[in-house]
Image: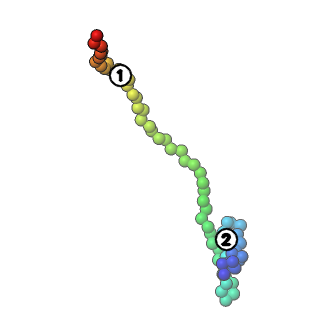
Amino acid sequence: AAALAVGACKKTDDGGIEVQKPVVGTVTDTVHPPQITVGTDTHTVVVPKIEMKKETTTVVTPKVSVKKRP
């Protein structure tokens, strides 16, 4: 039945689809599929500016020396 329904379809000039349904005779219905438009949008994104400060610190480390015994 599905193959029969697909074979009884045709596209109209305005983009609709005519479908013939088997009843006691035939009835033609027009189905209007949705129109889809694809495009792009432009958006502005604000990104905060992050600054890093360089600092120098002095680290005091102990100096260890080992003397050998004579």
Residue at x 66% of width, y 81% of height? 1
From the image, which quarter does the C terminus lie in?
top left
Give the left or right position of residue 35, taking residue 68 as reference: right
Q: Nearer the viewer, residue 41 or 7?
A: 7
Q: Nearer the viewer, residue 3 or 35?
A: 3
Q: Place residue 35 in its image quadrant.
A: bottom right
Which amino acid lies under the numbered mark 2 shown in the image of this protein?
Ile
The single residue placed furthest to the front in the displayed view is: 70
Please give the residue where the numbered disc 2 appears in the rendered image: 17
Residue 18 spot, x, y in % from top left: 68, 74
The secondary element bearing badge 1 is classed as loop
The single residue placed furthest to the top in the displayed view is: 70
The secondary element bearing badge 2 is classed as strand
Q: Earlier in the sequence, mark 2 or mark 1?
A: 2
Residue at x 31% of width, y 18% of height? 58
Q: Is residue 2 above or below residue 64?
A: below
Q: Nearer the viewer, residue 55 or 69?
A: 69
Residue at x 42% of width, y 32% of height? 49
Give the left or right position of residue 52, taking residue 12 as reference: left
Local crowd size for mark 1, using a 10 Å CA cut-off: few (<14), some (14–19), many (≥20): few
Local crowd size for mark 2, using a 10 Å CA cut-off: few (<14), some (14–19), many (≥20): some
Q: Nearer the viewer, mark 2 or mark 1?
A: 1
Residue at x 63% of width, y 72% of height? 31
Give the label on residue 55, or none: 1
Q: Disc 2 and disc 1: Cα gap in Å?
A: 73 Å
Q: Place residue 19 in its image quadrant.
A: bottom right
Which amino acid lies under the numbered mark 1 shown in the image of this protein?
Glu
